Amino acid sequence: MATVQQILDAKGGTLHTLPPEAMVVDALKLMAEEDVGSVLVMSGGKLAGIFTERHYTRKVFLAGKTSPTTPLADVMATDFYGVEPGQSAEACMAVMVEKHVRHLPVLKDGELAGIVSIGDLMKSIIDEEQFNASQLVRYVRGMN
């Protein structure tokens, strides 16, 4: 099974970040422009939190707050769960299922190295299963 580092290498290294004082509307615009479901909130070069579409729905929209006047610091998750580059896609999926999250920051020696989403993990798992199936077909055909 692929490691988190292999998944990060395959998807590229662009991180979408904003400071905690940025407004929610800025995060929504960035997520829409980049077609991503989360923004990492950075303060002083360190990961301070994560803001996702789910946070918008629950902590802004349903709470009656407004996107242009609500800073990310007020609604971001600060109790996020991180993974390390050497962990497997399977281990990440287990964390996502257990913690009910769809995005995991990747931390290497305490520093932000990337982020993996449930979509990234599913793509990796599907690609690996397709490769295994094609290898099995080649093996079986070679036996005939």
Image (spheres, rainbow, N blue to C red):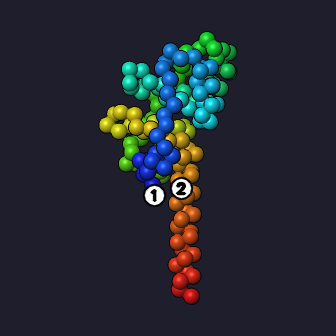
Q: Quadrant of the C terminus?
A: bottom right
Q: Quadrant of residue 105?
A: top left
In the picture, measured across the screen, residue 57 lies left or right of residue 109, that is right
Looking at the rendered structure, the secondary structure element under dot 2 is helix
Q: Residue at x 35, y 39 (%)?
A: 108
Looking at the rendered structure, the secondary structure element under dot 1 is loop
Q: Label 2: which residue?
A: 125
Looking at the picture, does residue 65 appear above or below residue 121?
above
Identify the residue at the far bottom of this view. 144
Task: Judge the density around disc 2: few (<14), some (14-19), many (≥20) Cα neighbours within 10 Å.
Answer: some
Q: Which mark is residue 87?
A: none
Q: Are marks 2 and 1 in contact (CB under 8 Å)?
A: yes
Residue 93 shows up from this direction: no
Q: Residue at x 49, y 37 (%)?
A: 14
User: Which residue type does callout 1 highlight?
Assistant: Met
Q: Nearer the viewer, residue 50 or 33?
A: 33
- On the image, the x and y values in percent for residue 42 come to 44, 24
In the picture, measured across the screen, residue 85 lies left or right of residue 32, that is left
- On the image, the x and y values in percent for residue 67 come to 64, 17
Q: Residue at x 53, y 65 (%)?
A: 131
Q: Residue at x 53, y 55 (%)?
A: 125
- On the image, the x and y values in percent for residue 71 come to 55, 15
User: Which residue type does callout 2 highlight?
Assistant: Ile
